Amino acid sequence: MKLYYTPGACSLASHIALREAGLPFDLEAVDLGSKKTAGGADFLAINSKGYIPALALDDGAVLTEGVSIMLWVAAQAPTKGLAPNAASPQYPKLVEWMIFIATELHKAAGGLFNPAYPDEARTIMKANLARRLDWADQALAVGPFLMGNVFTVADGYLFTVFSWLPHLGLDQGKWPNLNAHFTRVKARPAVAAALKGEGLAG
Ligand SMILES: N[C@@H](CCC(=O)N[C@@H](CS)C(=O)NCC(=O)O)C(=O)O
């Protein structure tokens, strides 16, 4: 299978999930401006939505939407504990985290990369994001991971979005529990390998 990604973007969370799962995969970078892959293919022919991540499976199917990809990857490696069993009471709690990160953090932070928003809009967007980060910081007071003692795909996703804050002029230190979580996740060998694989090590 092959993960289509852009260095440091939300596809990093799917990349981390694949590395944590220990599954074999290839990587191909996508230029989001030209919608061309590193190999010169038309990315829109691979994912007509035009955004990463996209995971092309060996049977020809293409998964899109990070949450869907990460939950599928977790299910391929059940012994790794990247998601609770789907019939367990913990599973919907993981899905809650995934949806919270996708809709309240990822999209809020991602929008701030768009320079077209005027300053007044950016101020409101940043305040909304900060409010959600405040809540997540409190929720992580117990930890060490979002689901307790076990690292799940939600932790790689939160790590990815939190890594964007300095690029948005937001101080990671304002959220001490999230910041400690970020450091903890970054130290994982699979995460270091994903960062290196995207040319982001260091
Ligand atoms: N709903 C998608 C959104 C993915 C997304 O926002 N991807 C961004 C990078 S983080 C992107 O590719 N943007 C380029 C575009 O929308 O054209 C998901 O959750 O996977």
Image (cartoon, rainbow, N blue to C red):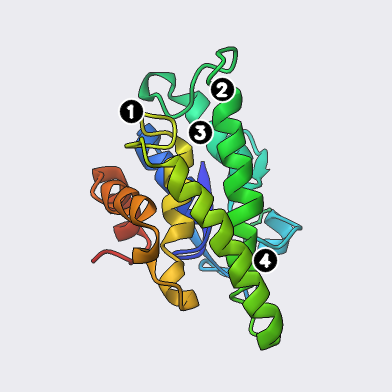
Q: Secondary structure at mark 2?
A: helix
**Residue 169 visible in image:** yes
Disc 2 residue type (three-letter): Tyr
Dot placed on the residue nearer the N-terminal end, 2 or 3: 3
Residue at image location 23% in from the left, 49% down from the top: 187
Circle 3 is placed at which residue position? 73
Identify the mark at residue 149; answer none if there is no mark: 1
Of 112 and 39, nearer the camera is 112
Identify the mark at residue 2; answer none if there is no mark: none
Disc 4 residue type (three-letter): Asp
Disc 1 residue type (three-letter): Asn
Residue at image location 34% in from the left, 56% down from the top: 176
**Whole-number angstrom distance, CA of label 3 to CA of label 1:** 20 Å
Circle 2 is placed at which residue position? 91
**Whole-number angstrom distance, CA of label 2 to CA of label 3:** 15 Å
Residue at image location 59% in from the left, 75% down from the top: 113
Residue at image location 44% in from the left, 64% down from the top: 8
Dot placed on the residue nearer the N-terminal end, 1 or 2: 2
